[in-house]
Image: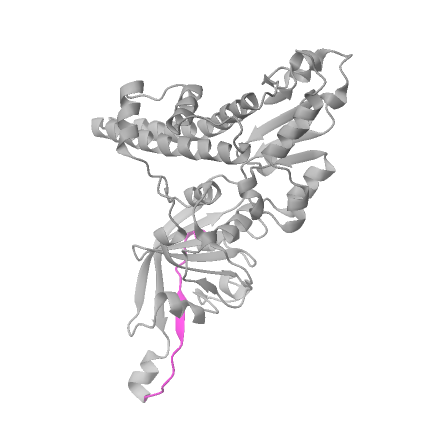
Amino acid sequence: MNEGHLASYFNGIAGKFLSPVETDPGVSHQHEYNGVSGLTDILGEPDENTSYATEFLYFSDEHDLPLQDSGFLTWYDARKKARDERAVMRWEYRLYYPVNDVTRESRPGDLLILAKKTDETILAIIAESGSDISNQLLYLFGLSGLTDRSFVTRLELQTQKDKLNYTSRLILDRLGIDTYAIGDEWLEEMIRRYDNRFPQTAVFSAFARESLGEIDSKADPDSLLLSWLEQEVALFRIFERYLIQKRLETGFKEVDDFISFSLSVQNRRKSRAGQSLEHHLATVFELNGIRFSRTPVTENKSKPDFLFPGINEYRDPGFVAHRLTMLAAKTTCKDRWRQILSEADRITEKHLFTLETAISENQTQEMIDRNVQLVIPEGIRESFTLSQQKWLINLEQFILIVRERQSSLVE
């Protein structure tokens, strides 16, 4: 898989927080972004008005998919006419934006990121103020020191922190940028094995692990899990692309048929992501000799994803509660993490494993208050604040906790 850096996709990044004059039509009708002097590093100092084809995206934590619109950003020198007609030697570049569904949604305090792509188009990304996705975008693009006055820009996108990993690929995927590339030999193998259709998720997850070679049972569980997940997504995407192309070649008789097909593609991605995470976690636990039950039924027909050491011990009133552990597994948290509070009533402290990056401190503080311990792969720890990192535990630490609780069990 091509590791790559942000520079593989972008020539420059600029970010700022939006001010009232840039977003509120009751304050200003200028339709221009302010504090743009730093943008000359990215957009240059052209003599003529320059328009860039732009994809506008608005993100909030409330919705999984962004609001989208297409248009142009225009970079121009407001003093050019004065220079040409009156020899007034001044330059004042401005960035004009159109009114569209995305710009109408923006509010003061929202994060604005302008990402100039290698094809000379621009992604104009706006994220709701204080949202998790706003934190994730700041982490992805390495932007700090932002205000609502001037853009902070970055041109060097090949540093170590710009190297793509599982975390950054997830965020870029939300921006519509597919960073996964894998050899055609695996496509040929999948066609041979699965006869032009996806197998069950457990089978495909096992194939992803197999494709990476023999497993070292003593391997770092955090790195192992992320490598399996990343490999499976890469395999999934190349096989999905092949299958979609075949379906498109047959055509659609009705518009509704196309819409139904498109929805099925999106739903398959979502459902398989969560299931594959559980399959890979289960394999990690098995490699580490950890006993567990998968999705057992507890009180009120709730089904925690993992119960340690198992459902029999959980149902045994003589088995001490402090040796029981539950783990929920969610690729993303958002507000859905509260669902686990009603699972496994005998267990006071709930453990939640997630791949979500840069969760807000407000959210993690509520988790602490609700006695939920967040478990994350070590590879995404740095996306959290330093104070959050002191509280988080990684997968290896979680395994040590469960192993200690199971140490007195007799097979």
Q: Is residue 168 above or below residue 394?
A: below
Residue 262 visible: yes
Image quarter of residue 74: bottom left
The x and y percentages for residue 18 are 52, 61
Within the image, what quadrant is residue 354 found in? top right
Q: Nearer the viewer, residue 394 or 43?
A: 394
Judge from the rendering whether residue 19 lies leftward or rightward of residue 259; answer left or right: right
**Lateral position of residue 73 relative to residue 303, left or right:** left
Quadrant (top left, top right, bottom left, bottom right) of the C terminus: top right
Please say whether residue 337 is visible from this viewpoint. Answer: no
Quadrant for the N terminus in the image: top left
Foreground of the two, 26 or 360: 360
Residue 14 in percent (x, y) is at: 45, 61
Q: Position of residue 299 (x, y in %)?
A: 69, 16
Picture layout, residue 58 above or below residue 72: above
Instruction: Please name the colour scheme applied to the rendered image.
Output: one colour
Q: Residue at x 68, y 34 (%)?
A: 372
Q: Which residues are magenta?
A: 87-102
Q: Is residue 87 left or right of residue 364?
A: left
Name the residue at 41% across, 47% down: 68
Q: Is residue 102 above or below residue 96?
A: above
- The kind of secondary structure the magenta stretch mainly shows is loop
Residue 162 spot, x, y in % from top left: 44, 52
Nearer to us in this view, 79 or 306:
306
